[in-house]
Image: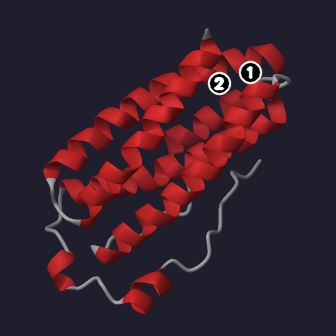
């Protein structure tokens, strides 16, 4: 089975159209580049996990959470892609290998078994993401930190939703 790839259109048009990014917004190779690559891959993984929840769960609340993940992380992917392009970082079109492996593990489950594993994964994943995004937001290194700061409330909302589902 081939892992789903996602197409989000041309985000570079926004960069050219508004013309707000310049060489001055680029940061030195380092943590911002690593963060934004990880963020992009994570957003792709969450979009796919959301679709999986819509398909494999029998619980309307889990399905609704999946829809929320899909929509919010699609938007976050587009915003992260703009930030990545602004600093000259390539934009991945697939989640990491580890994220793909987790997708396949969860894809093999259905119903209540899926719901439990999915919500546990969502809780742990969002805790990790929040810590990573908080660190980057505090770095104050331009468009990447701005993206991280703007995305944090959504990640916190997802953690809260997943935690309530697990109860």
Residue 46, percent from left and from top: 58, 43
Q: Quick one: SS at disc 1?
A: helix
**Mark carried by residue 164:** none
Image quarter where the C terminus lies is top right
How packed is label 1: few (under 14 Cα within 10 Å), some, or many (20 or more)? many
Residue at the spot 70% in from the left edge and 54% down from the top edge: 4
Describe residue 104's horizontal placement relative to residue 158 as left or right: right
Q: Name the residue under label 1.
A: 114
Q: Name the residue under label 2.
A: 118
In this rendering, does residue 95 appear at all?
no
Q: Which one is nearer the viewer's eye here, 25 or 90?
A: 25
Q: Quadrant of residue 24?
A: bottom left
Q: Along the horizontal axis of the image, is 4 left or right of 45?
A: right
Q: How many marks?
A: 2
* Residue 63: quadrant of the picture: top right
Q: Which residue lies furthest to the top in this view?
A: 167
Horizontal and vertical percent for residue 73? 55, 50
């Amino acid at each position: 089975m081939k892992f789903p790839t996602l197409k989000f259109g041309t985000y570079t048009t926004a960069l050219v159209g508004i013309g707000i990014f310049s060489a001055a917004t680029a940061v030195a190779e380092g943590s911002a580049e690593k963060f934004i690559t990880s963020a992009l891959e994570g957003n792709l993984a969450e979009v796919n996990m959301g679709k999986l929840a819509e398909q494999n769960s029998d619980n309307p609340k889990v399905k609704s959470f999946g829809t929320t993940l899909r929509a919010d992380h699609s938007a976050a992917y587009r915003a992260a892609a703009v930030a990545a392009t602004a600093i000259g970082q390539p934009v991945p079109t697939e989640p990491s290998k580890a994220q793909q492996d987790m997708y396949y593990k969860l894809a093999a489950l259905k119903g209540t078994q899926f719901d439990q594993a999915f919500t546990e994964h969502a809780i742990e994943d969002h805790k990790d993401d929040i810590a990573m995004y908080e660190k980057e937001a505090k770095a104050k290194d331009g468009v990447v930190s701005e993206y991280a700061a703007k995305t944090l409330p959504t990640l916190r909302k997802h953690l809260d939703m997943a935690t309530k589902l697990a109860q």
